[in-house]
Image (tube, rainbow, N blue to C red):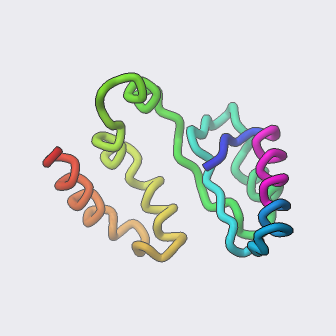
Amino acid sequence: PILANIDEIRKYEAYFQYMKEKNLIPDEKIRLIAYDYKKGINLQENLLQSFLGGNKYIGSVEYQSERERFRNLNSYFAKVAFEKHLDEYIKILSHFNIIQGKNAGSKIGVLLGSLFRNK
């Protein structure tokens, strides 16, 4: 995940170059998600796609003040994230063919719900 600003993109482009040269990792293997994305503040997603090129950019996970609050508590945001951000996660997972589109949302919700209710 990256923050969707020009400084982060430059930093990650340097990482990509290093990975290609030293580790022989091709561009086709690199994928990025804009994390804690703030629409209207961060770079627009079409610009991210353009700057990163190819199929590197696959989506975003919206910023949530609750996530930040949970970082300071003895709890996990994931307990509520699946309810509030399911569409974002489905889009990302479907990109990797882990699940297939929005019809899998209820299956993921049930699965994640059962996992986190037991903790």
- Point out residue 14 in the picture as x, y percentages from the top left corner: 84, 52
Q: Is residue 1 magenta?
A: no
Q: Is residue 9 magenta?
A: yes
Front residue of this view, candidates 24 and 77: 24
- Point out residue 105 in the picture as x, y percentages from the top left corner: 33, 63
Q: Quadrant of residue 106?
A: bottom left
Front residue of this view, candidates 119 and 112: 119
113 left or right of 15 in image: left
* Label tally: 0
118 left or right of 63 in image: left
- Point out residue 109 in the picture as x, y percentages from the top left corner: 27, 57
Give the magenta range: 6-16
| Residue appearing at x 68%, y 72% in the figure | 29
Toward the front, the furthest residue is: 22
50 left or right of 76 in image: right
Q: Quadrant of residue 25?
A: bottom right
Q: Is residue 28 above or below residue 9?
A: below
State the predominant SS element of the stretch in magenta: helix
Toward the left, the furthest residue is: 118
Q: Quadrant of residue 40?
A: top right
Q: Is residue 72 above or below residue 2?
A: above
43 left or right of 1 in image: right
- Point out residue 87 in the picture as x, y percentages from the top left corner: 42, 55
| Residue appearing at x 53%, y 41% in the figure | 62
| Residue appearing at x 81%, y 40% in the figure | 6
Q: Is residue 69 above or below residue 25?
A: above
| Residue appearing at x 78%, y 64% in the figure | 19
Quadrant in the picture for the C terminus: top left
